[in-house]
Amino acid sequence: MATISAISATFGASLKPCFKNNKVTGGTSTTLKMVRAGWAKNVFPTLRTSRFNVCCAAKPETVQKVCEIVKKQLALSDETELTPESKFAALGADSLDTVEIVMGLEEEFGISVEEESSQNITTVQEAADLIEKLVQKKP
C-alpha cells in the first residue's frame, strides 16, 4: 500500500511561518510545499538469503559434457552424481586437476580459455557458462 503525505506552509519575508489560519503579517511571502511518498513495509518482501546466484544458464548439453569431462579427468565413478553447483575442490580436484579439466574442455569444444578465466572456474556451471560465452564468440 502506498502512502503519500503533503505539507504546505507560507513564510513571510522574515522567514517566520505564517499559516493560512493565522494572521499574515505584511511583506513578501513564500509558499513551501513538501510531498513525501513511501511504500508500506509489507509490499516488497526482502530477499533473505545468504547467497545470490546469477546464472547465464548454459545449455543442458553443455553442462552434461562438462560433467562427463570432469568425471573423466578426476577418475570419478559413473555413479558419482554431478550437478551444475558441484565444486571441483569438493570433488577432490587440486589446481593441476583444474588445469587438466580446462584443457579437456578446450579440446572437446574447440575453444581456447585464457589463463585469467581458467582461474575463476570453480564449478561445473561456471565452466559451462564460460564455454557458452567462448563458443558464441567463435567466428
Image (cartoon, rainbow, N blue to C red):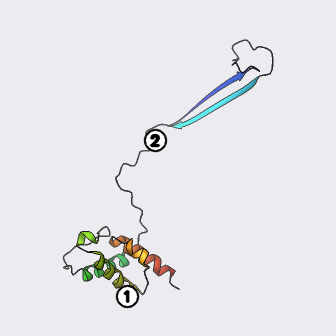
Secondary structure category for the residue under label 2:
loop
Q: Is residue 129 above or below residue 109?
A: above
CB contact under 8 Å: marks 1 and 2? no
Q: Position of residue 7 (x, y in %)?
A: 63, 26
In primary-sequence order, the first of circles 1 and 2 is: 2
Tag shown at residue 43:
2
Q: Position of residue 101 (x, y in %)?
A: 32, 80
- Compared across the picture, whether 29 is left or right of 104 comes to right
Quick check: can you spot residue 59?
A: no
Q: Amino acid at mark 1?
A: Glu
Q: Circle 1: is it few (<14), some (14-19), or many (20+) Cα within 10 Å? A: few
Quick check: can you spot residue 74?
A: yes
Q: Position of residue 68 (x, y in %)?
A: 28, 81
Tag shown at residue 126:
none
Residue at mark 1 to residue at mark 2: CA–CA distance: 51 Å
Kindly identify which residue carries mark 1: 107
For the point 24% across and 68% down, the residue is 90
- Compared across the picture, whether 103 is left or right of 10 comes to left
Q: Circle 2: is it few (<14), some (14-19), or many (20+) Cα within 10 Å? A: few
Q: Amino acid at mark 2?
A: Val
Secondary structure category for the residue under label 1:
helix
Q: Position of residue 95 (x, y in %)?
A: 30, 75
For the point 34% across and 53% down, the residue is 50
Foreground residue, 113 or 132? 113
Foreground residue, 13 or 86? 13
**Quarter assignment of residue 80:** bottom left
**Quarter assignment of residue 13:** top right
Foreground residue, 78 or 98? 98
For the point 41% across and 69% down, the residue is 57
